[in-house]
Amino acid sequence: MATTWNPGPRPEWVEAVNAGLVLPIAAEAALPLDRDGLIGEALARQGRASEGIAALCAPGPGTGEDFLEGLEIALVSLETEANLHLLGRWMTRRFLLRLLEVRLQICDWVRSDPGVRDEQIFEPLFVVGAPRTGTTVLHALLSADHRHRVPLGWEFLRPVPPPTFETYDNDPRIELADAELRGPQLVTGGLDAIHAYAGRMNKECLSAMSFAFRGEEFISRYNTPSYIEWLQSCDMTPAYEMHRLVLQILQRKMPTEKWVLKSPVHLHNLPVLLDTYPDAQLVITHRDPLAILGSVTSLIATLRWAHSDDVDTTVIGRYHADLYHGDLDGLVDLQAQGVLPTGRVAHGSFADFNADGVAVVARIYDELGVDLPDDVRAAMTAALAGSPREKHGDHTWSFDWLGLDAAEQKEMFARYCATFSITD
């Protein structure tokens, strides 16, 4: 195993674009990433060129002007710190414009249909483990339960107008979302082996929080240290208010008995999540923290390589070591303080998911007081068989890429491992 991360060569067409040989992309990428310019372009794309910032706000939680602070800090960080290559800059402008355009659509919908905020979300189930701990396979198994609704990529990227049963499988937004989600895989090979993305695949709900410009999509794709510093200290309530509003919009024309949601980012914000969804159920997944650090650093490095030539796995590794030491030690504290709701929290380990994922789900259901009918168990078994771990290739990574001392890290995470009996 190599001691340094090597992403391998990029496709020839990517090198051609980054050399400026594809002029339309080069011209668009050269445009500045400034607040007023991007907001103006987003409004113009929606036929609203004469309107201003007020169009991106609406009465009620989650849609106020507080999005501007995160937007401005993210833009400065992207311009001065992310060191984007030409194609990465082009993709980033498209990403930002989509967020602004959809935020405009969300605010329009709330103004035209204020009753959407009265939509009730009952006992949503959140998968909240650290990344690379089995959250994706658990989410897939839970989605096989016909009593659950798991949002797809296109729903979180473009939730307005609300989906309908009649057009759910052939909505034109599916292809738009698929093109955006598949973009990084076309730029850098091997991403599918780490984490596949597509318009019709289950999607992490952090994408709903990005419309508040308080979210980790800006961290996973880009080296943005000043934005990271701000995000770690800001109030995440507006992001969770937006998260809730997106779910309310999505279920407006498709009544939903139970949402099943997933994102490791919730581990950073469990008290805010529980304030937003007081009746939420949580499933927390666990794994050897050193494996978490190695695997997630490989993922983030690959995502950033799709946008920049400047990727340092030692910087990424140190960031994740500090982040997850705080998160996982904090999890111990939350449990000791009784913050985690009794009877509404279950746990699972990466090793157990690999051994028998359906059996783990059966135990989780039992702990949460949920029945597991035979037809649901059979559907989960079929889903697991139809999506083997190496379907898109083998994900290889090395702890050596991180530049961290393994013994030191084991000591840092000892309290967490002892509390939750982590050995795998």
Image (cartoon, rainbow, N blue to C red):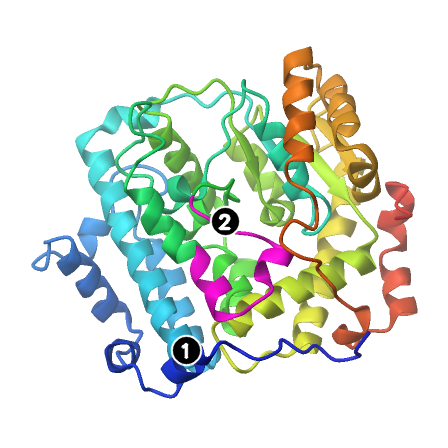
Q: Residue 137 sits in which quadrant?
A: top right
> As rendered, which of 156 and 245 lies closer to the eye?
156
Amino acid at the residue labelled 1: Trp
Q: Is residue 204 above or below residue 9?
A: above
Residue range of the region highlighted in magenta in the rendering? 182-199
Give left or right: position of 72 versus 344: left
Tally of numbered discs: 2
Question: On the image, numbered disc 2 is attached to which residue?
Answer: 236
Magenta stretch encompasses residue 185? yes
Q: Is residue 224 above or below residue 379?
A: below
> As rendered, which of 195 and 33 lies closer to the eye?
195
In terms of secondary structure, where does tag 1 sit? helix
Q: Is residue 361 above or below residue 399?
A: above
Pinpoint residue 321: horizontal percent, then vertical percent: 74, 64
Pinpoint residue 365: horizontal percent, then vertical percent: 71, 20
Amino acid at the residue labelled 2: Met
Give left or right: position of 87 versus 104: right
Which residue sits at x=20%, y=57%? 53
Q: Residue furthest left?
A: 50
Question: On the image, numbered disc 1 is attached to which residue?
Answer: 13
> As rendered, which of 119 and 84 lies closer to the eye?
84
Counting residues from the start of the chain, the first of labels 2 and 1 encountered is 1
Pinpoint residue 89: horizontal percent, then vertical percent: 38, 75
Mark number displayed over residue 40? none
